[in-house]
Image (spheres, coloured by chain):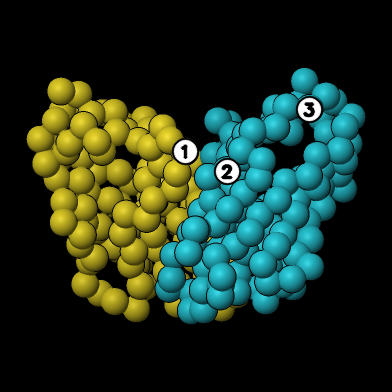
Chain colours: A yellow, B cyan
């Protein structure tokens, strides 16, 4: 099965600054999808952004963007102009295009300092 | 649609007791996932179904765990007998159709085994 690795258990950023969360994955597949989810203290899982592996262009959603490096199997999330409401656990996820399997990394806890 | 509905939200049980967690996926979704979240292991995939059929249960910890999906609108995760190390938050998620769609999560069940 594919594995997803988030090497930063915790990250901290000053309000209005930019922070990058790292994610790497291991797969032998060429077609797949990648996601970043946010989990605030409410425990709800919220989709932040998605990326199709066949697309070279990096996905962007407002203040959130990704740096997708397919050859390196890397999928980092950049949060610009960080806000207090961005404080949460962030999970990177890999979804196989062949069998629907969807796996998550261990998560990164982001703290935003005022 | 009300989203993915899990019950109960919280469960406290004594070691050795049987525990049944329930999930109602979003209507029309054909994939259903069960995850377990702990501080140590993050978000682990336990089992997933496509069109009510279990596809991969390799994440189920041991024989004490079992999952069923008798129809498209209902799934259960059962632990028998329960142990203190099963204490965690259990999430159910569902998704529709193509694998580039995200999984929608329920609010989770916090299980405490004492």
In the picture provided, is B76 more to the left or to the right than A70? right
Q: Which residue is mark 2?
A: B108
Co-location on one chain, circles 1 and 3: no
Q: Are marks 1 and 3 in contact (CB under 8 Å)?
A: no
* Location of residue A32 by image quarter: bottom left
* Vertical arrangement, residue A38 with respect to residue A69, above or below: above
Q: Nearer the viewer, residue B93 or B44?
A: B93
Label 3 residue SS: strand
Q: Which residue is mark 3?
A: B13
Q: Which residue is mark 1?
A: A43
Report the chain holding disc 1.
A
Mark nearer the N terminus (3 vs 2): 3
Q: Position of residue B31 (x, y in %)?
A: 60, 70
Q: Are marks 1 and 2 in contact (CB under 8 Å)?
A: yes
* Vertical arrangement, residue A6 with respect to residue A48, above or below: above
Q: CA distance from mark 3 to mark 2?
A: 16 Å
Query: Residue visible at 88% across and 32% down?
Result: B17
């Amino acid at each position: 099965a594919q594995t997803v690795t988030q090497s930063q258990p915790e990250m901290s950023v000053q309000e209005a600054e930019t922070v990058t969360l790292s994610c790497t994955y291991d797969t032998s597949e060429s077609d797949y999808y990648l996601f970043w989810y946010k989990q605030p203290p409410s425990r709800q899982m919220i989709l932040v952004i998605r990326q199709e592996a066949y697309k070279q262009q990096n996905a962007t959603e407002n203040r959130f963007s990704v740096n997708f490096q397919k050859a390196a199997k890397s999928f980092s999330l950049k949060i610009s102009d960080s806000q207090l409401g961005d404080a949460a656990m962030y999970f990177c996820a890999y979804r196989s295009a062949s069998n629907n399997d969807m796996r998550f990394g261990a998560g990164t806890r982001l703290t935003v300092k005022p | 649609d009300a989203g993915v509905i899990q019950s109960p939200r919280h469960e406290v049980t004594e070691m050795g007791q049987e525990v049944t967690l329930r999930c109602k996926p979003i209507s029309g979704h054909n994939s259903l996932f069960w995850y377990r979240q702990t501080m140590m292991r993050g978000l682990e995939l336990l089992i997933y179904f496509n069109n009510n059929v279990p596809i991969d249960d390799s994440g189920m910890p041991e024989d004490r765990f079992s999952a069923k999906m008798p129809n498209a609108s209902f799934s259960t995760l059962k632990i028998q007998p329960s142990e203190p190390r099963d204490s965690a938050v259990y999430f159910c998620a569902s998704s529709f159709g193509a694998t580039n769609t995200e999984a929608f999560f329920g609010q989770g069940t916090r299980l405490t085994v004492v």
